[in-house]
Each structure stands twice: as C-alpha cells, then as structure tokens.
Amino acid sequence: MFTIIFIYLGNAAIVGIERHLHLHHLLSTLLVYLLFLGVLVAAFGQIIPPLVSEASGLPHTLNELVRTYPQLESSLTKLVKNLTQNATVISNGKAMLSSGMVKLSRFSSGVETVILAFFFSFIFNLTKAQLQRFVHAFTKSRFAGLFVPMGNLVLKFVHIFGTVIETQLIICTINTILMVLGLWLIGMPSLLILGIMVFFLGLIPVAGVLISMIPLVIIAFVTGGLIRVIEVLVLVVVIHMFESYFLHPRLMANATNLPIFVTFITLIVSEQIFGAWGLIVGVPLVAFFLDVFDVQLKVKSETLPTPTDHA
C-alpha cells in the first residue's frame, strides 16, 4: 500500500519537475527524493526535541498541581495504594504491558515497512523507462490479447487510486489548517511544529488521530492544565467529525464522481471490511469496478496500445 502511494506521489512530483525545470529524469528523481528526505528529517528534528522537553517537564507540573491542590496528594496516594494491593489490577496491568509490547513491535515493523516502501518507490521511479519498455514488450507478444486488457485494468486502478491519494492530501491540508487555527485560539505553543506533526500523522487513517492526541494532550497539560486538555480533546473530536461526516465524503465524491451518499456508505462498509485502510482503498475499488462494468465516470484513465496498433 505504502509502495503504491510513494510511487504515485513521487512520479507526479518528478513529472512536474521535468515539465517545468526541464531536468534529466535521473536528476529529477534524485531531487524529489532528497527533498522528501530533507523535509522528513527537518520535520522530525523540529518535533522530537520540544516533545521531549515538554515530557521532561511533566513531573514538575504534577508537583505544582499537587501544591496548588493539596487534597489531590492524599487522593493519589490512596489510589496508588489500592491499585498496588489489588491482584486483579496487577494482572490486568501485566496484560496491558504485554499488549503494549506487542503493539510497539508492530509499530517498529510498520516503520520498517514504510522505509522499504520508500526505497522500492525510488527504484521504481528511477528505472521507470526500463519498466515501461518491459511492460510494452508484452503488447507485442503472442498473448497480447491477454496482457493488454490486464494492463489497462491496472492502469485504471492506479489512476483512480492516485486521484484518491491526491484528495487525501487535500483533506490532510485542510484538517491541519483547521487544527492549527483551533490550537492558536486555545493558546497552544509551537504551532508550526504541531501543524507539521498533525499533517504527517493525518495521512494515517484513524490511528493517526489517536497518535497525534498523545503529544497534544501532554503539551496541553504542561502548558495549561486540565482545562486546556479538555479544550484540545473537544477540538480534535469536532475536527475529526467534520472530516468523517462532511469533508471526506464530499471531496472523495468529487474526485471519483460518485454520489455523496454512495461514497459515505462505501467508507463505512470498507472500514468494517478492511479496517482503517478501507477508508483509503474502499472508494477507489468501487470506482474501479464501476469503470470495469463500463459505468461512465468522469475519471479518465490511460490505456495500453491494443495489439492492432502494432500491426
């Protein structure tokens, strides 16, 4: 999945650079991927240090909170004592710790998958001309009547899927702008850093919202206490509902020419079938099968030459 996304986005950027700057394909490819790596390194370099700083200041903030509200100290002490003496809580804690370790290993595996996908997309775009010659060689073979329709189906799906990915980027951009404006109204610091974090995590369906809430809640608690945490949670819920029930269905419907109601139902059903990734692959799959069944859509796709073109 990530490989297809990186290939499409990388190819779009490379084609744009070749068209406007008239650079060689090799230079354009290297420039795009070096810029992308530079943006990632700069983004994480801006995000990680403030988060570490805010997290390190969390114990001091808790101490200040206890000093401000002395009654909290006795309540927290009693709570900790009850938890440590409760066998059920200890057993559940061990289970949660084990589950957390499993999820951490899955996260590291996911990071490895993304890195490999980025590398494979680089190789694909770098050797695109060779791959095109390789694929077109099948259109001149004895089995061209079999390979050409299959190739056309692949091109149709890639084109529709790419359109959906572009739409997802637009959705992430709009969400980031709304989130930054909301955080500014709340009074949160480091808006640029938080905006970068929200944008990149927004590319991950569903889970990205949950992951982004962790640093947001930490920073909100350190800088503004429980009231600001509640404000941030309300802001995240409102923007997420706006995206899920209006922005996402509307823009996806425009991108694929599907009715908004059909798009909305598709998102719900595909999320139940494929999980979080169904929010991305569901709509292009429906649009693809409609195109295969010759239901006329406005999304235009490329086609491979038919065998008769080479006669």
Image (cartoon, rainbow, N blue to C red):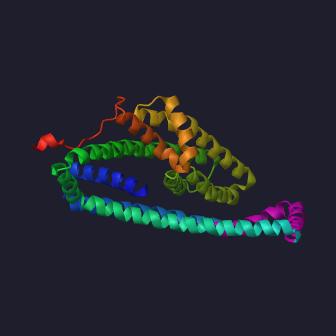
Rendered location of residue 149, percent (x, y): 27, 43
Rendered location of residue 50, percent (x, y): 57, 65
Classify residue 229 as left or right of residue 184. right
Q: Residue at x 52, y 37 (%)?
A: 266
Between 267 and 199, the one lying in front of the other is 267
**Magenta stretch holds residue 64:** yes
Between 272 and 237, the one lying in front of the other is 272
Assign the magenta stretch its main secondary structure: helix
Q: Residue at x 53, y 39 (%)?
A: 267
**Magenta stretch holds residue 29:** no
Quarter of the image containing the C terminus? top left
Q: Residue at x 11, y 44 (%)?
A: 310
Single out the residue that lies furthest toward the left. Answer: 311
Residue 63 shows up from this direction: no
Q: Quadrant of residue 31?
A: bottom left
Classify residue 80 as left or right of residue 292. right
Q: What count of labels does the image hold? A: 0
Rendered location of residue 77, percent (x, y): 87, 68
Residue 15 shows up from this direction: yes
Q: Residue at x 44, y 31 (%)?
A: 258
Quarter of the image containing the N terminus? bottom left
Between 138 and 27, the one lying in front of the other is 138
Classify residue 79 as left or right of residue 147. right
Rendered location of residue 73, percent (x, y): 87, 65
Residue 247 versus residue 225 in the image, above or below = above
Which residues lie in the magenta part?
Answer: 55-84
